[in-house]
Each structure stands twice: as C-alpha cells, then as structure tokens.
Amino acid sequence: MEENNLGMVAQFKKDVRRRMLTGLLLILPVYVTYFVVKFLFGFVGGTLSPVIKKILQFYGVALPRSSLDEFIITFLGLILTFISLYFIGIFAANFVGKAIITYFENLLTKTPFVKNIYSSVKQIIHSVSLPGKQSFKRVVLVDFPKEGTKSIGFVTGATQYNNEKKFICVFIPTTPNPTTGFLIFVTENDVMDSNLSVEEAFKTLFSGGVLAPKDIIASFKTGNTHNSSQD
C-alpha cells in the first residue's frame, strides 16, 4: 500500500513538472514577442514623441497626464516616423537629394574616427537590407571547436590568402544568442553543405537544439570532392 502511495506521488510530481514545462513553452514565446514589440514601439515611436509634445505646447494643448495619453503620443510619433522615413526616401531618390547626401557622406568619410564607424555601419546595413544581397548565403556544417564535432555555420563571403588560396568566411553563432559568435576562414573542402534553410538553422540555434530537424543531410560539394581526390 505504501509503495502504491509513493508511486502515485512520484507520478503526480512528474505530471506537474510536465504540465508546467508545457505551459512555459507556450507562454515564453508570447512573453518574449510582447516585450520585443513593446521595445520597438517605444523606441521608434518615442524618437519623435518630444517633437509632438513641443508642437502641442506651442498650440497650447495640455501635455499628456495619463498612460493612455502617453500611448497616443507614442503612437503618433510612430506614424510620424514612418511618414518621415518615406519622404526622406523620396528626397534621397532625386538628383538634389543624391547630391546633398553625397556631400555629407564625403564629409563623414573624411572625418577621423567617425569615418571608420560610419563606413562599417553602412556596409553592414547594406549587406543585410539590400534586395538580392543575402547576408547568409549558405548553411554549412564545419568542424568546430575541434575536429570531429560539427557546428552550424553561415557562409557570409569569400576572400583570398596572399592573393592565391581562396577562403570562405564562415560565421558560427553561439546558442541561444546567435547575435554573437566566431568568424573563421576555411577552404571549401573544410565545410559540408547542409539541407537546412537559414530559418531552420536559426530555429535550431535559438532553441538550443530542441527544434532541430529530425534529419540533417550534409555533403561536400561535388566539385571540391573531385578536386581533393585528384590532389
């Protein structure tokens, strides 16, 4: 009888843990999404909120006193930000706008210290946002941190060593925060192309392997394998 009671208690504890874990997995994505959206809303909308408050003061309108008033101001700031970006895009597309932007860009690129920051940020933004230019070209598997262990990597570009040997740039993200990681330079023969899409790879990294595909197929490039066998 005592053993049955102990078994029931153990089973009850197991069920409680499983249900709590299930609830956590359901709530956590919603929780994180809420805070990300809230942050972006406050950041983008809050950029022009002071401008709207100054305009209200100029016309003698009372400043917001409640959280609802603040929300309305932030929402108006969000709309005004998008409208401003739209007209800036139109301005940058015409001849006069291009000439002014070129002038200020030349000014920034000739300013010590500032030119390094501006050029780096511009290159990163362009590589990520321009259509037809994918930042992560391929998802590969590479031996990292030691031979025999496979890590997910993203091919981001190519370079040459001493103007002779060709290397590819592979970014290996950390988990569960793939915004940091390691950049390594390897030859094509050192990586294996996988059947993972960029989205599937990021799902795997974010979840720490919980959402990893059931079957990852990886193989060396045919051309590289053939060349290496000839060598």
Image (tube, grey):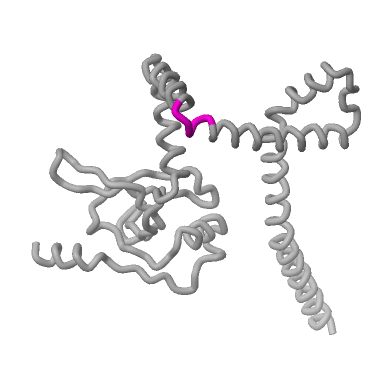
- Rendered residue at 76%/68% (across/down): 19
Q: Main SS of the magenta segment?
A: helix
Which of the 4 image quadrants contains residue 70?
top right
- Viewer-closest of 21 and 70: 70
Q: Along the horizontal axis of the image, is 96 left or right of 54?
A: left
Residue 79 on image: x %, y %: 71, 37
The magenta stretch spans residue 231: no
Image vertical order of residue 116 relative to residue 158, above or below: above
- Rendered residue at 49%/62% (across/down): 200
- Viewer-closest of 14 and 89: 89
Q: Along the horizontal axis of the image, is 74 left or right of 142?
A: right
Residue 34 on image: x %, y %: 72, 49
- Rendered residue at 50%/44% (across/down): 179
Image vertical order of residue 201 relative to residue 47, above or below: below
- Viewer-closest of 87 and 151: 87
Residue 173 on image: x %, y %: 45, 49
Residue 76 on image: x %, y %: 76, 35
Point out the stretch of residues depicted in magenta: 91-95
Q: Along the horizontal axis of the image, is 146 left or right of 229?
A: right
